[in-house]
């Protein structure tokens, strides 16, 4: 969870800086910095959960002996 929070803070800073550089507007920079990183952080959280699950599934598949593949398909 700490990784997600620090990613969010970094993303807020980047979103604000890029939007401000493109528009020259503090209001636009603040609005984009408030909305876009929050959406990405939620997506990032679930992205990490999916990758963790895929890693567990792969590790489990590697533990199944080659001669037992049919048993584990049922």
Image (spheres, rainbow, N blue to C red):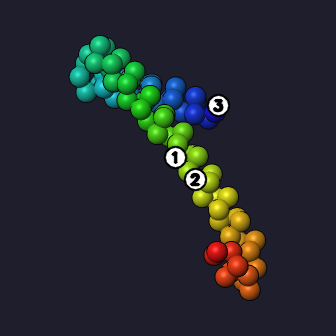
Residue name at image x 52 percent, y 42 percent: 46
**Res 51 label:** 2
**Residues at circles 1 and 2 in contact by the CB criterion of under 8 Å:** yes
Mark 3 and mark 1 residues within 8 Å of each other at the beta carbon: no
In this rendering, the answer to whether 47 lies above or below 37 is: below
Q: Give the Cα separation between the discs numbered 3 and 2.
A: 17 Å
Residue 47 badge: 1
Mark closest to the chain's N terminus, 3 or 2: 3
Q: Which residue is mark 3?
A: 2
x then y, percent, for residue 62: 71, 72
Q: Quadrant of residue 2?
A: top right
Residue appearing at x 45%, y 25% in the figure = 13
Cα distance between the residues tagged 3 and 1: 15 Å
Residue 18 located left or right of residue 72? left
**Quarter of the picture holding the N terminus:** top right
Residue at the extreme top of the image, as rendered: 27
* Residue 27 x, y percent position in the rendering: 29, 13
How far apart marks 1 and 2 lie (CA) works out to 6 Å
């Amino acid at each position: 969870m700490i990784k997600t929070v620090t990613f969010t803070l970094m993303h807020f800073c980047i979103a604000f800086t890029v939007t401000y550089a493109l528009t020259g507007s503090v209001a636009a920079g603040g609005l984009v910095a408030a909305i876009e990183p929050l959406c990405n952080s939620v997506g990032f959280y679930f992205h990490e959960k999916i990758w963790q699950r895929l890693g567990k599934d792969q590790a489990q598949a590697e533990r199944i002996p080659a001669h037992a593949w049919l048993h584990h398909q049922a």
